[in-house]
Image (cartoon, rainbow, N blue to C red):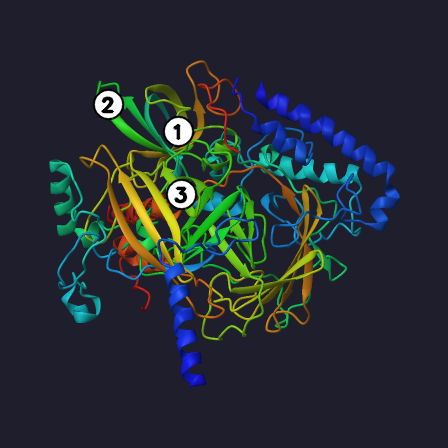
Amino acid sequence: MQTRFVAVAIILAFATVSAAQTPETYTAARAPDGMPDLNGIWQAINTANWNVEAHSAAPGPMFELGAAYAVPGGFGVVDGGTIPYQPWALEQRDENFENRMALDPEVKCYLPGVPRATYQPFPFQILQSQQHVMIVHEFAGAVRTIYMEDHVEFPAPSWMGWSNGTWEGETLVVDTTGFNGNAWFDRAGNFFSDTLHVVERFTARSPETLTYEVTIEDPAVFTRPWTMTMPLYRRAEQNLQLTEFRCVEYSEELLYGDLRKPGTPAPPR
Amino acid sequence: MRKRFLLSITISIGFVVCASMAEAGQLRLVQPDLPPGADASYVAPRTPDGQPDLQGFWTNATYTPLQRSEDVSAEFYTPEEYFEMLSGRVDREEAQTVPGTTGDVHYDFTQFGLDNSQSTLSLNLRTSLIVDPPNGRLPDRVDGQGGGGRGRNRETQYDQVQNMPIGSRCIIMGGAGPPLMDAGYNSNYQIVQSPGYVTILTEMIHDARIIPLSDGPAAPEELRQWVGLSRGHWEGETLIVETSNFNGGRPFQGAGENRHVTETFTRLSDDHIDYRFTVEDETVWNRNWTASAPLARTVGPIFEFACHETNYGIANILSGARQEEREAAEAEQN
Amino acid sequence: MLTTTMPTKLTAVVAIAVCALVATMPASAHHAFAAEFDVNQPITLKGVMTQWDMVNPHSWFHIDVEGPDGEVVSWMVEGGSPNTLIRMGITKNTVQAGQELTIEGYQAKDGSDKAVGRNFVLPDGTRLFVGGSAPGADGGGR
């Protein structure tokens, strides 16, 4: 009798807690500076880096790698389904796809840009201080400095853009411009220009997850702004650290192998 | 016009510094590394999570050599000697820019603000960065040979990209270390602190070293990195960072994968961090050695140093070398 | 005169008196440039700058040069990292496309239309960016 009472009490307690803590109503713990605490190592789990639009499973670009590097199917992360390209841009995207091995900047270990860096299959770390929120990515050691005070316009274009951030209640809102237009959205050739404007919203939805909403605007490429949404998952391992993936060394043979002095053997793999 | 303006400011402030140093000879002896005019009782403000605050933009740009020169015996320069040393260095560098010499085949640093005279320099009256051994020089090497670092074969260095210097390949540069060393120009750092972490962003090449402050298990032997693996903790006002697990790809003074580096950071004033490092490598030296390479406050921002992405120099150098070989081969045939 | 807020703050923090502003050169950079460009092929390019790529490790100037035959050749000229200039208040808007420029330097060893720029000189004889009047700079940086 007592056990059943305790069991019921426990069930009721959980029910109460769950009811109070839906993703919509969840409020994160506060960081020591009083802001929502989004510090930690996070990672996306989806196929957006393969293709942000919905896509079937497909062979990879090199048959020698077989199933190991084939493309997993995915539901896509673009709200509304497809990216609203201008007609010329849709043709350009398809041409990019046909030549993706040669053209994808990720293959060359170039900085991935935003938002691609967020959903590449590598962890990243959010480090919050009052003046700057840093986001450091394992891939290529890409760094984003989000200026929380003294917002200015970007001085020059860059791969990761120039980010100005504010807190809107529970949400970290990051407004980024100043892209050089050379990065891609994914491995499928989805692209943008140097007039790209990205607004990201990071909101805690549970102690272990964030909601990541991105608004994309580029009047040179798209017919209207569009959005993508996905959860981000906290890497729960104890004592995890980002590890180096400098990756420059892995792309050099591809980039410069043809400039080798004739007769010089290539280094062993 | 603008050059003279800069120059007059530096000279006038320089004299103020010199005067205070000359008068406060006792200060120099008792607290030799305290920056001029600094308050010995300074305590750094705190971050929201209670760490001494090291945040901001810092530089380690310096003319002070790692090792004490053979013709110098004192541990410290007087201010007059220091400025004489600086002028000597400047004169030597000027000699490299004679038209028609290889030294002239370079953009003029002053036009891009990259020369030391237009930079914040980290003031340091020491005659060497090395403070221990007391002679200011590296300890004896275990193999009895002199000099640090393995030489690169200059005959074959442009035969393929993999033979070229690590920095030219945009993999990693000297400012990242650890330890943090003057990169030559753009030698700037941004320190950001968040709960449980100190992050040091080195400008070249956008290297963010995220240092956890919690205790953790020993790093696995098999996981090795260009910057090693770091872990830090605070002891009072001093941050102590231990780093090992280097992959040996860019040896520091000859110490590769077996080196262990201990760094300390202590904020001495709003504009000055005392930064020291101890290097240990039993396979290279018979004892460890310590250097002091202070950080001075500078201005930001640290703009993205995307190096590999637009590193046209590699392709240009390699194709230039191939062109020269073709021309030499044709000349031989004729 | 190039107006920025940065230089006095830069030099006021730590005071170092030097006798002259001269070009310093990290040892490693010295070698590589002489391998990329030919010391025996000095060149002067006079033309119209179409673009300044503010990239690293070295920035690149694109300049259209009209040859004696009237044909316009586009050159790519290597300059320094823009990062310190940005801290001094220089931005993408500082040097406009269409700016007339004379560049003294050395031609690329591989024979292409590339060079390293030793001196970048404006029509009035002053040097670009530092050392003389330049197209107006935005204030800013932080």
Residue at the (63%, 49%) spot, across then down = B54
Alpha carbons under labels 2 and 1: distance apart = 25 Å
Closest to the camera, between mark 2 and mark 1, is: 1
Alpha carbons under labels 3 and 1: distance apart = 26 Å
- The image shows residue A118 at horizontal and vertical percentages of 34, 53
Closest to the camera, between mark 3 and mark 1, is: 3
Residue at the (43%, 69%) spot, across then down = A13
Residue at mark 2 shares a chain with residue at mark 3: no
Q: Which chain carries label 3?
A: A
Image vertical order of residue C40 relative to residue B283, above or below: above
Of residues A112 and B287, the one drawn nearer to the viewer in this rendering: A112
Residue B130 horizontal side relative to residue B48, left or right = right
Q: Which amino acid does label 1 sit on?
A: Lys
Q: Dot 3 corresponds to which residue?
A: A173
Q: Mark 1 lies on which chain?
A: C
Image vertical order of residue A8 relative to residue A146, above or below: below
Of residues C122 and B232, the one drawn nearer to the viewer in this rendering: B232
Q: Mark 2 lies on which chain?
A: C
Alpha carbons under labels 2 and 3: distance apart = 48 Å
Closest to the camera, between mark 2 and mark 3, is: 3
Crowding at label 3, few (<14), some or many (≥20) Cα neighbours within 10 Å? Answer: many
Residue closest to the far front: A1
Crowding at label 2, few (<14), some or many (≥20) Cα neighbours within 10 Å? Answer: few
Q: Circle 2 — which element?
A: strand
Residue B240 horizontal side relative to residue B252, left or right = right
Q: Check if mark 2's residue and mark 3's residue have beta carbons within 8 Å.
A: no
Residue A123 visible in the current orientation: no
Image vertical order of residue A203 relative to residue A215, above or below: below
Q: Which amino acid does label 3 sit on?
A: Val
